[in-house]
Image (cartoon, rainbow, N blue to C red):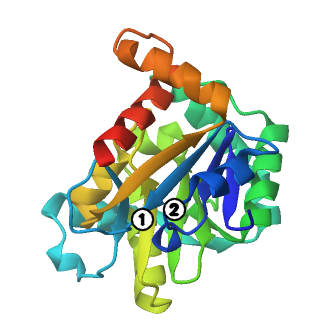
Amino acid sequence: MNSYRYYKKTWIFLEESKEILLTEEEAKSILKDKGLMIRNTYDFDTKDNTSFWFIIKDKLEDISELPFSARRNIRISQRKYDFGIIDKERFLKSGYEILSSAQQSYKIKEKSTTEYDFRRMLDEYEQDGDIEYWAVKDILNGEIVGFSINRLKKDSCEYDTMCCKPESLRNRSYPYYGLVYSMNQYYLGEKKLKYVCDGSRTITEHSNIQDYLIYNFKFRKAYCKLNVYYKWWFGVVVKLLFPFRNLIPFRNVKAILRMEEYSRKSK
């Protein structure tokens, strides 16, 4: 199971481009000790338009090829902020405060992350592989107002968690534009990685970040196939609830049933 990470009772493969279809026996072995389900994606970047995908960018264009609004906002952001990698110790001094303030501003409220959970999350990330912490730093006063936690893989990088203080989003300084542009330049331009990734198709549908990246930075959908394996009793529950998926009000339950729907459509 070294190739999988455990996240919210689900096993997820660490390198999406390397994943293959599991057998029933392999899935049972993974679920034997813990976990309720396995998200098994395969045939990464298939030519078929399937029901599931990852959002990736594998070509680095000149800034002049980006939309006018994106170019303008990148330049505004660059006049206000510096962007770069910082060490974990420095990140911890401001990271949790930024995440907490951002969570409080979300329209769809989630359970707030405690500082203990935040530190434990970072430790788990580092157990899975190499992590880099990016900071958005105000040029005038040195304040860190945003960050990105990035997972480094063999030939790619996943932008796992991006977050900015709400006030930096309201004052039209556009920190995300400069941050994403700088990271793309670094990983695709300097590091020569095959692609950068913002994760898979969302099953909670609470964020428009993927549409934002596709329009402003020319990310694209890398389609793949999806199979979901369940611990036997949990699979029974999913099958019983599936016909009523549009009637269930609980967001976490709806997300699992949406994943099941994507899996069925993928076959």
Q: Write the residue at 50% across / 30% down.
A: 256
Q: Position of residue 74 (x, y in %)?
A: 32, 65
Nearest the eye: 14 or 149: 14
* Badge number at residue 159: 2
Q: Contact (CB < 8 A) between labels 1 and 2?
A: yes
Q: Write the residue at 43% across / 72% down.
A: 196
Nearest the eye: 50 or 147: 50
Q: Position of residue 148 (x, y in %)?
A: 57, 59
* Badge number at residue 180: 1
Of the 4 image quadrants, the one containing the N terminus is bottom right
Name the residue type under label 2.
Answer: Tyr
Q: Nearer the viewer, mark 1 or mark 2?
A: 2
Q: Write the residue at 50% across / 89% down.
A: 191
Helix, strand, or loop for circle 2? strand
Name the residue type under label 1.
Answer: Val
Nearest the eye: 245 or 23: 23
Sequence-earlier tag: 1 or 2: 2
Q: Is 71 displayed left or right of 159 in the figure?
A: left
Q: Position of residue 96 (x, y in %)?
A: 72, 44
User: Where is 143 relative to 84, above or below?
Assistant: above
Helix, strand, or loop for circle 1? helix
Q: Is residue 85 visible?
A: yes
Mark pair 1, 2: CA separation: 9 Å
**Which of the 4 quarters of the picture holds residue 182?**
bottom left
User: Where is 1 relative to 265, above or below?
Assistant: below
**Which of the 4 quarters of the picture holds residue 35?**
top right
Nearest the eye: 180 or 24: 24
Q: Position of residue 8 (x, y in %)?
A: 67, 38
